[in-house]
Image: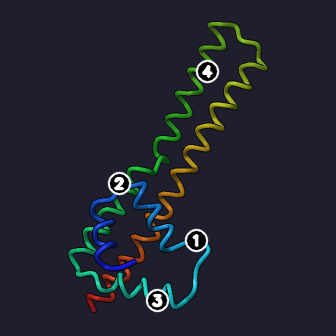
Amino acid sequence: MNKTILKHNLVQMDSRDLIKYIQKEFPHSGEAYSEQKRKFQILKSLNPSDLTLAISRMTRIEASFDHTKMWTVGSVLIGTCLLSLRILFRFNLLWYILIATSICLLLLFLVRKDRDIVITATYFKELLEQIKSEKGK
């Protein structure tokens, strides 16, 4: 990782690709202290406007992949649709349970996948905010 590539990626990469890049450069499992320190110094070398843009981008990614507000409404709509199908077509209760469970598991998997994106964006945003506040002192 170098400053030029980092600045380019923060501005021009697609959101999912940017998150993959951040996860690669700042892995959850950790890495050698010297490597982390080097990457931290590169982040510290960004100017305040670059930091502000990166923080804004992370905030936008967090908001666009955070499905917690939609999950409640979505689950009520799905439940209502499935119940309507059960009443209209007189599905066997076993089939109804299998279909409902399959749909819920699929949605849960998709939400979980996007949740990892939100976690990474939040982590990186907090790191950038910490760097920006240290620079302001």
Q: Earlier in the sequence, mark 1 or mark 2?
A: 2
Q: Earlier in the sequence, mark 2 or mark 4?
A: 2
Q: Nearer the viewer, mark 1 or mark 2?
A: 2
User: Between marks 1 and 4, how big is the CA–CA gap?
Assistant: 39 Å
Residue occupying image coordinates x 31% and y 62%: 57
Q: Residues within 10 Å of mark 3 (few under 14, many from 20)?
A: few
Instruction: Return the x and y of residue 75 as percentages of the image width and height.
Output: 56, 34
User: Between marks 2 and 4, how big is the CA–CA gap?
Assistant: 35 Å
Q: Amino acid at mark 3?
A: Lys
Considering the numbered disc 3 on the image, is that residue within a helix, a strand or a loop? helix
Q: Residues within 10 Å of mark 2 (few under 14, many from 20)?
A: few
Labelled disc at residue 37: 3
Q: Earlier in the sequence, mark 1 or mark 4?
A: 1
User: Between marks 1 and 2, how big is the CA–CA gap?
Assistant: 21 Å
Considering the numbered disc 2 on the image, is that residue within a helix, a strand or a loop? loop
Q: Earlier in the sequence, mark 3 or mark 2?
A: 2
Q: Nearer the viewer, mark 4 or mark 3?
A: 3
Q: Earlier in the sequence, mark 1 or mark 3?
A: 1
Labelled disc at residue 28: 1
Q: Is residue 96 above or below residue 4?
A: above
> Which residue is tagged 2?
14
